[in-house]
Image: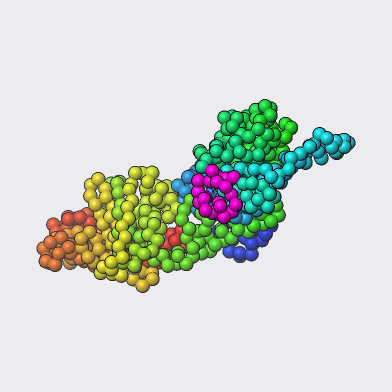
Amino acid sequence: MPRIIVLDNLSQDGLDLLESAGNIDYEVRTGLKGEELRESLAESDGAICRSGVKITAEVLAGNKRLRAIARAGVGTDNIDKEAATRLGIVVMNTPGGNTISTAEHALALMLAMSRNVAPAYQSLIEGRWDRKKFMGAQLAGKTLGIVGLGRIGQAVATRALAMEMRVLGYDPFLPAARAKELGIETVASARELLPHVDYLTVHTPLNDETRGLIGAKEVQVMKPGARLVNCARGGIYDEDALVEGLKSGRLAGVALDVYPTEPCTASPLFGMPGVVCTPHLGASTEEAQTNVAVEAAELLIDFFTTGAIRQSVNMSPLDPKTLESLRGYLNVAFRLGILLAQMDHSPPVACRLDYTGEVARKDTRLLSAAFAAGLLENAMEEGANIVNAELLLRERGIELVEQRSSDVGDFSSMITAEVVTEQKTSAATGTLFGNNLPRLVQMGECRLESCLDGNLMIVGYRDMPGVIGKMGNIFGNHRVNIAQMSVGRATDKPGGEAVGVLALDSQPPAEALSEILALEEVVRARIVKLPQAGEVPAWMGG
Ligand code: NAD
Ligand code: MLT
């Protein structure tokens, strides 16, 4: 039964869902850090978190068990996705569930800042009735600038328009036509907004482009008396520049929900006039927390029961139907990878996959990832799967190219894999019999027809009478039973190069292989070990 660790407070509805799944064992352990967090993750198959826990490369190091992390929320910046990907861990998030709550919080901060709600209440409870001091500003008729017009940015725009604001926006990925439909006037850069807006709000991720997006120089070009809001990520505004802007009077207000380092309990901005701050409360509503908790629990339940991958931020989606329809070919590709990895022990420099026939119309990227996972299966300490295999190949400078052709060859579908090392090129072609039987149908130039499981001896020899008998005798002497045998040759004429694939019921001793190699007709021979028939790795639903 998969074990899931819940690392941050999660709404009860999400926990109830995990409970009712029946096939999930879960435990809530919040506030974990360092070694304790590392150990807990190492003993779990899945994890659910919000933004309170930091899943760093250090806490993931050496983890061989964890397969999926679901983030109940949008931002996955508290998870080292590169480290997770390298370890083959799927990272998923629940982006839509807290959109409205966060957009409402941005509006709440704009209103609170404009109407001095927090200091006015503070003054009241301190016994003062001060109506002059807290003169405010109205939103209607003002211009709002929005940087980042994704889910939350758009939700803020529609609400601001309803409040009779004019909305200007910038987002490099929002087509102008869609912006127009929403009633947003777009500009060509964030900077272009600055001289024109009374309010500026940012709704982008924090990345190299958005870090420090508004610094001292940008504050200088803002319309005097502008007010700034950040409900996205701390660091998009340079806080020192905000302090200076407030002191100089260039800025009339600053409202923050997020900080460069969280938790944040001290900041030069706290207490300054015109400032209102909340402790990362954008998504803190009953509704949003129920949404994201339920969604995160569903993501993990689906992943562990059907293999479905949805809303992953580090790999392509994989729904149960696609997985089911691909499983047979994933298995062929995976097994070809395992086979070719054992054909030559020098490091590969490139791999090529040719998909012919019906399989060429399937999601071949996943099949290539499955091949790569097979190729690296026995090489990687951390284990390879379709999440990390391509990255692991890339990191090692191994090029992987694909070619697809829907022309049907000898079989309705074929996958030919070629692995190039500095010494030689090895190629094998596989297909699927029925839904579930991976078969090897060509080695190099030689056509044959063999199973793709268990212990195989792959032998290249000169096609002469008696060779097969000699090999049979050697295995007989070593009490190794030959379960199946297939031979093929590159040309129709005898005497040329031939390949034999012998399926063996047990792993032959090294002496048997030496004796085979000593036969004068034998050019090369290798014993390769494949998973048993029907055996599939966990990521393929095994
Ligand atoms: P989203 O992915 O739907 O939208 C992000 C938008 O930013 C995209 O449209 C993208 O094109 C745009 N963008 C990226 N780089 C840009 C740049 N350099 N300039 C302009 N636009 C750029 O994400 P979302 O769900 O709207 O979330 C937005 C942000 O809000 C995220 O950082 C998320 O972590 C944060 N968030 C905060 C809270 C909170 O509690 N305060 C809650 C939810 C989300
Ligand atoms: C998010 O990215 O979803 C928000 O910051 C909310 C949260 O951290 O829970």
Task: Return the x and y of residue 353 as percentages of the image width and height.
Answer: 31, 57
Task: Return the x and y of residue 539 as percentages of the image width and height.
Answer: 46, 58
Going 26% across and 48% down the picture, which residue do you hit? 421
Position above or below: 444 against 135: below
Is residue 388 shown in magenta?
A: no
Front residue of this view, candidates 271 and 301: 271
Front residue of this view, candidates 464 and 155: 155
Position above or below: 102 against 34: below
Position of 100 with respect to 533 (left or right) is right
**Count of labels shown?**
0
Q: Which residues are magenta?
A: 168-187
Q: Which colour style is shown? A: rainbow
Position of 150 with respect to 342 (left or right) is right
Going 30% across and 62% down the picture, which residue do you hit? 405
Position of 474 with respect to 236 (left or right) is left
Task: Return the x and y of residue 162 as percentages of the image width and height.
Answer: 68, 52
Going 56% across and 35% down the picture, which residue do you hit? 212
